[in-house]
Image (cartoon, rainbow, N blue to C red):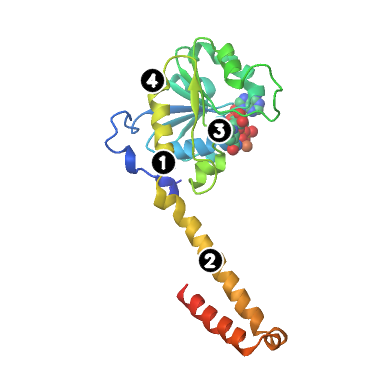
Amino acid sequence: MSGGDMAKPLLGHRSTEGDPSITPAAGRTIGVLGSGDFARSLAIRLVCSGFKVVVGSRNPKRKAGLFPSAAEVTFQAEAVKKTDVIFVAVFREHYSTLCDLADVLAGKILVDVSNNTEINHHKESNAEYLASLFPASTVVKGFNVVSAWTLQSGARDGNKQVLSSSDKGQIPTVSAAEAVEKKMNIWVEEEVWRMEIYISVGIIALGLLSLLAITSLPSIANSLNWREFSFIQVTLTFADARE
Ligand SMILES: NC(=O)C1=CN([C@@H]2O[C@H](COP(=O)(O)OP(=O)(O)OC[C@H]3O[C@@H](n4cnc5c(N)ncnc54)[C@H](OP(=O)(O)O)[C@@H]3O)[C@@H](O)[C@H]2O)C=CC1
Ligand SMILES: [Fe+3]
């Protein structure tokens, strides 16, 4: 999987250079539990950002084909043994099915990316619930406001901010996860706005052309005096030609 846009971090890479707080991504291994939409988008983005990715699935054989070939897809327990930072791309309702992994997850960082489908349905947040299931792990909440689609297609649409929080210590200690987040938080004005400008110019041009076409209809043209008609035809033809 090497799509042009995917080769770039989500929001460009300008200001990551020379930032000493960012640990180089290359060579770090990040784990992802789950093989659904979000896990796949995350894995693709991480691979393209230079991370090694190991995906933990209940059925790795069947799911491997959905991931970039650079990502390793294996059983859940195997995957979490290979890394210290694990994205839990599984719905809250299925967190309890991961309890068998508690021993191998001890001392590791779990990133809770989940969202609920109903408001105020559970008494504690998803991250608190995950932390209660894995008391020996550090749970960080983050990435839940970035959609799978935005992760895959870049930052031109959708949310661009990656918010994160944790009870245990400073988030900056979460070096690998933070490196990804910082890369994703960089706002490159030209890249973000260029597409919007293209679309706006296209819409204006379409509007002007439509006006030109409508005023060319004999029934409409006959209801204009020659001054209005020539103003619209000459000015709009000129404006359209320029665009
Ligand atoms: N989709 C999105 O845009 C976003 C999703 N999220 C969050 O990411 C998480 C995953 O979402 P998404 O990828 O869309 O969901 P999917 O339904 O596409 O994937 C969920 C994955 O969970 C894994 N899983 C592990 N244990 C179980 C189990 N007991 N039963 C069912 N599935 C299980 C499965 O992988 P396997 O079969 O390989 O074990 C499955 O592929 C959710 O918490 C969601 O809130 C957050 C932001 C955006
Ligand atoms: Fe989904």
**Separation of disc 1 and disc 3 at Cα?**
23 Å
Residue 202 circle label? 2
Q: For the residues marked 4 and 3, what is the alpha-carbon distance in whole angstroms? A: 34 Å
User: Dot 1: what SS?
Assistant: helix
Q: CA distance from mark 1 to mark 4?
A: 23 Å
Circle 1 Cα neighbour tier, 10 Å, few/some/many (<14 / 14–19 / ≥20): many
Q: Which residue: 52% across, 31% down? A: 143
Q: Residues within 10 Å of mark 4 (few under 14, many from 20)?
A: few
Foreground tag (1 vs 3): 1
How many angstroms separate mark 4 from mark 2 (CA)? 46 Å
User: How dense is the environment of label 2, judged by Cα within 10 Å: few (below 14), some, or many (20 and up)?
Assistant: few
The answer to which of marks 4 and 3 sits earlier in the sequence is 3
Q: Identify the secondary structure beneath mark 3.
A: helix
> In front here: 32 or 124?
124
Left or right, residue 29 beside residue 135: left
**Which element type, helix, strand or loop, lies under badge 4?**
helix
Q: Dot 2 lies on which element?
A: helix
| Mark 1: amino acid | Cys
Depth check, front residue: 32 or 180: 180
Cα–Cα span, label 2 and label 3: 46 Å
Disc nearer the start of the sequence (1/3): 1
Identified at 55% across, 33% down, the residue is 61
Residue bearing mark 1? 48
Q: Earlier in the sequence, mark 1 or mark 2?
A: 1
| Foreground label between 2 and 3 | 2
Provide the residue designation for mark 4: 173
Do the CB atoms of the residues marked 4 and 2 lie less than 8 Å apart? Answer: no
| 12 is higher (above) or lower (below) than 212 | above
Classify mark 1 as within 8 Å of ligand 1 or not, answering yes or no. Answer: no
Above-or-below relation of 115 to 107: below
**Pointers 4 and 3 in contact (CB under 8 A)?**
no
- What type is the residue that disc 4 sits on? Thr
